[in-house]
Image (cartoon, grey):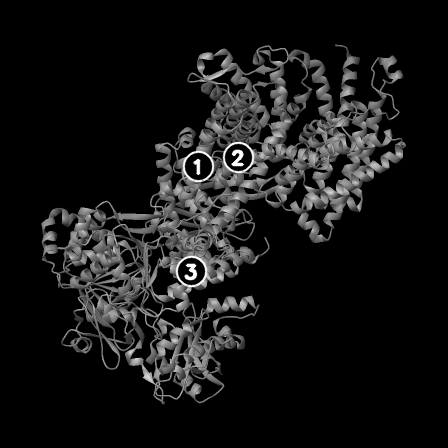
Amino acid sequence: MLYRESGQFKSTYAEDQQIFPIRQDRIAMAALLLVAFVAVPLLGDQYWLSAILTPFLVFALAALGLNILTGYAGQLSLGTAAFMAVGAFMAYNFVLRLPWLGILPSFVLAGLCAALVGVVFGLPSLRIKGFYLAVATLACQFFVLWAIQRWGWITNHSSSGVITAQKITLLGYPINTPATKYLLTLAIVAVLALAAKNLMRSETGRAFMAVRDMDVAASVIGIPMMKTKLLAFAISSFYCGVAGALYAYTYLGTVEPEAFTLDLSFRVLFMVIIGGVGSILGCFLGAAFITLFPIFLSIASKALETALGIEISHALVSNLESIIFGGLIIFFLIVEPNGLARLWQITKEKLRLWPFPH
Amino acid sequence: MSGRTIGEVTLSVEGVSLAFGGVKALSDVSFDVREHEVRAIIGPNGAGKSSMLNVLNGVYHPQSGKIKFKEKEFTDMDSHEAASLGIARTFQNIALFKGMSVLDNIMTGRNLKMRCGILQQALWLGPARREEIEHRRAVEQVIDFLEIQHVRKTPVGRLPYGLQKRVELGRALAAEPKVLLLDEPMAGMNLEEKQDMCRFVLDVNDHFGTTIVLIEHDMGVVMDISDRVVVLDYGRKIADGVPDEIRNNQKVIDAYLGVAH
Amino acid sequence: MDVSFFIEVLAGGLLAGVMYSLVALGFVLIYKASGVFNFAQGSMVFFAALTFVSLTERGWNFWLAFAVTLAVMVALGIITERVVLRPLVNQPPITLFMATIGLTFVLEGLSQLVWGSQPHGLELGIADVPMEWLSQKWNINISQFDLFAALVAGVLVAVLALLFQKTRIGRALRAVADDHQAALAVGIPLQHIWAIVWGVAGFVALVAGLMWGVRNGVQFALTFVALKALPVLLIGGFESIPGAILGGLIIGAGEKLAEVYVGPMVGGGIESWFAYVIALLFLLVRPEGLFGEKHIDRV
Amino acid sequence: MGTDIAGLDTFPRLLMHHAAVRGARPAIREKDLGIWQTWTWRQFADEARFLACALAAQGVKRGDHVALVGANRPRLYATMAAAQCLGAIPVPLYQDAVAAEMAFPIQNASIAFAFAEDQEQVDKLLEILPQCPTLARICFDDPRGLRHYAGAELLAYDRLLEGGRADYRRDPAFLEAEIAKGLAQDTAAMFFTSGTTGVPKGVVLTYHNLIERSRVVADWEGITDRDVVLAFMPPAWIGQNIFSYAQPLVAGYCICCPESAETVTTDMREIGPSYYFAPPRIFESLLTQVSVRMDDASAAKRALYRYFMGVAQRVGERIMEGKPVGLGARLLYGLGDLLVYGPLRNVLGMGRIRIAYTGGEAIGPDLFVFYRSIGVNLKQLYGSTETSVFVCIQPNDRVKSDTVGPAVPGVELKFTPARELLIRSPGLFKEYYKNPQATLEAKDAEGWFHTGDAGYIDADGHLKIIDRAKDVGALTDGTLFAPKYLENKLKFFPHIREAVCFGDGRDKVCAFINIDPDAVGNWAEKRSMPYSGYTDLASRDEVYDLVRGCIEQVNADLAGEPEIANSQIHRFLILHKELDADDGELTRTRKVRRRHVGEKYQSLIEALYAGRQAVHVEAQIKYEDGRTGTYSSDLKIRDAKVFPPAAGQRAA
C-alpha cells in the first residue's frame, strides 16, 4: 500500500545490490536513524534511555553476534554470555592499564580478545556438529566464568569479583549521562550492524550459509571448512565481546562474573529465535521483544492490580514471565520458525503487492 | 563431437581401489580423460560410478592407486584442492544451498576467485564492491547461458526439479572449471528437459572447451554426446573405448543383462 | 597419598557418577525414541522432586505421594508431547531442541508458581552416613545413601534395558527412534509410543529428583543437575543406555579425582567445567560418543 | 522544445543533434543480464555512425531497402538509423510472422541486406532464401545456436560493427557527406500494412511525414526529453514505431526495451513509463487480470476494493479532468488513492503515466472509464499507417469513451455521401510501393486519402467511427448493419474475446463468438465446473447461457438506438477454436479478416440462417510439437431474446 515502486528500475549492478533497493525503504531507514540519533536523546526521559533503549541496543548487538554464528553459519552455540564476559573484563583492563588508548580502541581490543577465545572454543566445531557442538560451547561458558573468578589480575584483585566501569570520555567529551551513553552505544551498534549486513551479503556471508546448508557441497566447490567455521566463531565472538564491553560501560556500570551466567546466553538465544534466525533485522526485533516484554508484563500486572484490587507478588510476576517466555518460544517455533523477521517480510511482500493477493 | 580438437591426456586414474569396511566399491580401476573430451562412465546400479567421481574430486579417499591431473600426482585428492585446481562437479541428488536464492547459489561458485578480506567486505570498500559487481557480471553470463533469468531471485528450494539441476550446473560453471564432473545430470528429467540439458552440456564443452566426465544411464544420451566411454561393473573396469565399440561389446551387454559372474 | 583415601574418593566419584547417569538416562530415553534432545529433563527432575516433597509435607505418606507425583509426571509428558512436539513433528532437530529450552522455562516458572520457591529438605529414611563395617576395616567411608542410590539406578537401568531389548514396546521404541515415517508406515502408533516414552522419562526424572533431592535438597539449583548430565551424554553418546551409565561413572570418578588432586593446584572449584573438558577430549577422538552410531552422510 | 530542431529535417540529422545537445542523457535502455543496460544519445549516435560505414562497405547505397526482423532491441533501432544515414530505407517486418509472409516484402522491395534478431528469425529468412534471389546478406545480433551455421550470407553484428568502426575512423567525412545528402522528402521508412484483403501494401513515408507529425503532437501534448516509453509491441507496427523511433528522435525522450515478451508486465512495473500507447486488447487483458486477481483476494480487501471503486466510478474521472466535485467526495477519493488506486496504478506500472493513448480499434466504455477513474489519463487516438498515425487525439480536458477526438492541428477531415471519411494532412504517405493503381485508389487528385472508415462528427466536434466503410451494409429491410459496432459492444464483456457478425443482405443478424479462455476458465473454476480444454469449455451449455446473457444485454442497448434497433443479434454459436493470425483468420494486429472467415466457415453461417440447432464441423488442428490431427464435433446453435425497439431497458 505504501510502496510506489514503478519507476525505480536498476541500471547498474551496484544499484541492484544495495541494502535497500526500494526508495520507500531507504526513506524509512533514514527517518528511523534520524529519530534514533537526534529525537530520542533530546526528548527521551532518563528511565527510557538508561533502562530500556541502551540495553535493547546492547542485546541487539549480542543477538547479532549469535545470529552470525547460529543463524548464518549454522553452528549452534550456548556460550554467548562467556564471550560477553571476556569483552567486558578485557575492556575494563585495557581502560585501566592503558588509559592513553581511548575508549573505542579498548572496546575493539576487548572484542578481539573475545574473538580469540571464540576461535579456541570454535576448534571442536571442526569435528563435531549439532547438539554435540552446543554442549561443547557450554564448556566454554563454565570455563570462562571460572577463569575470571579465579584469575585475580582480570578483576584487578577486587575481593568480591565486582568491577566498576571507569568514567570514560570520547574525544574529550565525558560519557556519563544516559543520553551520551545511549548515543555511544547507538553509534557502535549501528556501525557494527552495517558491517555485519555488508559481510553477510558478500562472499563471507555466502560461505557461512553454504556451510550451514550443506557443508559437503560447500567444501567441494572450494569453500575452506576450517577457515570459514573459525571465522564465524571469531566474528561472532567479536560482536559479543563488544556487546559485553558496552553492557558494562554504558548499561550496568558495575559488573561481576555472575552477570554473565548461562541464563544470559539463553536470553540472547531467545532473541535470535523469536527475532528470526539468519536475519540482521531479526536481531533488533528479537532484542526489542525480549527487552520490552517484561516491562509490558509489569505494567499489565500493575494495571490488573489496580483494576481488581488484589496484590500481585513480585515472585508471581517473575514466574509468569518465565512461563510466558517459554510458551512464546514454543509458539513461535510452531507458527513461524523464522521469527518476527519473517512475519515482517511477509507483511512487506503483501504491501508491495497491494491490493492484489498474489 | 563437432569441430573442436581433443587434446592430450589431462586427467588419469591408475589402479585406484576404494573400500568401505568390507565392501569393495572400486578395485584397481584405471582410465584416462583427454582435454576438451566428453568422457562417459556407465555401468549398472552400484557399479561404483559415483564412488569413482567422489574419488576424483576428493570426497572419498581411495586405499590405493594414483590420480594424475595436470602433471601433478595425488594418492588421494582433497576436495578443496580439487576445486582450486579447476575440478567442479554436480551431485546425483541435488546439493544446493536451500537457504539462498539462485543468484547466491551460483555466486558461491565464484568463491575461489574472490580475494577481498573481511574488513574490506565489512566496510563495502571500493575493491570489495568492484569485486562483487565484477563477479555478479560473470554469474549473469552463466544465468543467461542457462536461460534461468526468470528465477534469478527465487529461493532455490521453491524451484522444480529440472530447474534445480540447471542451477547446480550453473554453480559448477561459475567456477570456470577445467574439468566438469556430472553425476547423472539428466536423472528424473522428461524428454524436453533432457534435450535442454544435452544442449547445455554440449555448449559448455564446445563454447568453453571444458573437459566433461559424465555419468549417465540413458544409453541414447551417452552414445550421442560422448567421445569415449568407460564401463564399470562391480567396481571393476570391464570396457573402455568409443561408443560404437562399447555398444556391441559382449561383456558390457552381459553386465547390463545380468549374466551370472 | 594413601591408597584407602584414593579408593574412598574413587568410590564416591563412581557413586556420584551413577547419580549423573540417572539424569542422563532421561535424556537418552527421549532422544532414542523421538530424536528430540530434551533440554527440559533438568527442570522435570526439579518439578518432580518439588511436587513429591510438597505432597509429603502435606502429610501424604511416601507411596501415595510417589504414585500421585508419578501420575502428574506422566500427564505432563503426554501434554508436552501433544502441545509441543506434535506440531513440530518434521521440523529440524535444532528447532525441537530450542522448543525444549522453551519448555524448561515453562516448567521452572510453573513449579515455583504452584509450589512456591522455598527450598525443602527431603528425607527418605536412609541416613547419609558412612557404612560402619567398611570404615573400621579399611577406614573407607562410603555413605549408605550413595550405595542405595547406586542400587536403585542399577535396578532402573536393568528394567529399562529389558524394556528396550525384549518387549514388543521396546522394539517399537527402537523402530521409532530410527525413522519416524518408516515406523508410521509399519503401523506403529507414533503418538501413542511418544506418550509412553515421555511418561517413562517422567518416572526416571522423579527417581532422579528424589535421589538428588536428598543429596542437595529440593531447590531451584536442582535444575543445574541437567548441566552435569550433558557431558555424560557427550561421552556415552545420545542414543545408548549403557553409554549413559558408563559415561556417568567416568565423569563422576574423573570429577571427584580432579577436584581432590588437580583442583588445589589451579585454585579449586573446577567441578563446574572439568566434566566438559573430559567430554571434549573423548569427542575429539570419537565425535559421536562411545556408543553413538557413526554418522556417514552419503553424497 | 520545438524551436531547437527547426532546421533538422531527417532522422540522422536529429540523431546527431541529440548526441550533441543531450549526449549524456539516456536514449535507449534494455533489460538484459539482470539490469537495464543504458545507451546514451552519444553512444547511440556513434553506434549508428559505425554501423552506417559497415553497411556502406556491404554495398548498401542510397535508395536501397533494408529488412529488419526482430523485437524491440537497441541494435534494431541502431540499424534503422544507420540505414537512414546512407539514405537507405529500413523496412521493419513482423517478428512473429511465419516465413511465407516475409517473402513478399523482400521480393517486392528487392531487399539485399536483412537484420535478423536471433536464430529463430535467421531460420525463417534461410527458409525463404530460394524465393528471394536478391537477399545477399543476413546480419544476426544474438549468436546463440548459430555457431555451426555455415551459410556464406550470414554475418555477426559484432564483426560487422568492428569493421564499421575502423572504416569510420579512417574516413569520417564520407559519412557526414552522406548524412548531408538527406532531404526532407526522401523516404524515411516503409511499413507493410497487413490489410484485411489481398496482398500487403508497402506504405512509403517520408522524413517530412513522420517528423512534422511527431513534432506537432509533441508540442501539442507537451512531450519533453524527460519522458519515458516502454516499447513492447512489434516494431513493424506504425503505432509502435512512431512512439519508439520517430517521436523520440524528435522530442529526445528515452525508449525502454523489455527483456522478453513474457516479462513485459514486470518490466513495465520497473520502468513506470510516463508516455504509453497500446491497442484496446492490452488494456482489456490487464483489466481481466485485475478482476481475476481481485477475486482471489481476502474478503476484507475485496470489500475495500469494491467500495472505493464505486467512489472512483462516481467521481474519479471528474476529479482528473478538474471538474467541480463535492469536498466529501474529493477527500474520499484522496483516501481511495492512498489505499487502492495509487497501489493499483503502481502494480500495473502506470504509476507515472502522464499521457496514455488507446487506438487501432474501438474500446469498451466501461474498460475506458475504469482506467480514467483510477487516475490514468487514458485518451482515444485515431490514425493509420498511411497517415503517420496522428489524425485525431482527444484533448486532456474533453475525453469521451465513444469518440476519437477532434482532428490534430494541420489535419483536414471530409466525408463522402456514403459517410466514408477522407483525410488530408502533411503526414499523408507518399505512395504504395510499386503499386500506383492502389495509390490512385487511396489518394485522389486533390490529395484526399480515402480511409475506408465510416463515421461522422458529433456535437463536440469529435470524430466518431462506426465501422469499416466497405463492411457497412444493410439488412433486407434497409436498416444500417455495422458489424464492427456490434462486435465491439460484444467484446466489451470480459468473457468474450472475439465476435464476428453477419447480416449484410440478410433478414436478421447472426454471430460467431470466441470466448476468452482465462476469464471463462476462472468463471468455470469458481463454479467448480471441470473442463479439459478450450474446445470442451466452449461447447458447455452453461457457457452458452453465459454468452446468451451478454448478447441479450447488447440487444437491450441496441433497442435504445432507433436507426439500428433491429440489427439485434437473433442467433449465435461459440466457435470450437480461437480465431488465430497463423490460420489467416486475424491480421497481425488481431483484426478479424471478415471475408476470409466468411468463406472458411460458410457451412456454419448457412446452419445459423437455416434455423438448425447444431452443425457438424471438421477442422485441422496443429499440435504443439508439429503433428497435425483433425477435430470433428457438433457445434450447438442458440437463439437470443430480442427486444422491441425503444422499449428495451438493461436486461436482468
Disc 3 marks a residue whose amino acid type is Val
Chain ID at mark 3: D
Residue bearing the label numbered 3: D315
Where is residue A54 drawn, in percent x and y? Answer: 53, 27
Chain ID at mark 1: A
Write the residue at 79% across / 16% down: C8
Determine the CA span between mark 2 and mark 1. 17 Å
Residue bearing the label numbered 2: A284
- Nearest to the eye among marks 1 and 3: give it: 3
Q: Tell me the SS state at disc 1.
A: helix
Where is residue D128 drawn, in percent x and y? Answer: 26, 69
> Relative to A349, does residue A318 appear above or below in the rendering?
above
Determine the CA span between mark 1 and mark 3. 35 Å
Determine the CA span between mark 3 and mark 2. 45 Å
Where is residue A285 drawn, in percent x and y? Answer: 54, 37
Residue bearing the label numbered 1: A31
Q: Tell me if label 3 and label 2 are in contact, CB under 8 Å.
A: no
Judge from the rendering whether residue A18 lies leftward or rightward of residue A154; answer left or right.
Answer: left
Judge from the rendering whether residue C128 lies leftward or rightward of residue D172; answer left or right.
Answer: right
> Relative to D134, does residue C6 appear above or below in the rendering?
above
The answer to which of B236 and A242 lies nearer the viewer is A242
The answer to which of B64 and D554 lies nearer the viewer is D554
Judge from the rendering whether residue D107 lies leftward or rightward of residue C244; answer left or right.
Answer: left
- Nearest to the eye among marks 2 and 1: give it: 1
Disc 1 marks a residue whose amino acid type is Ala
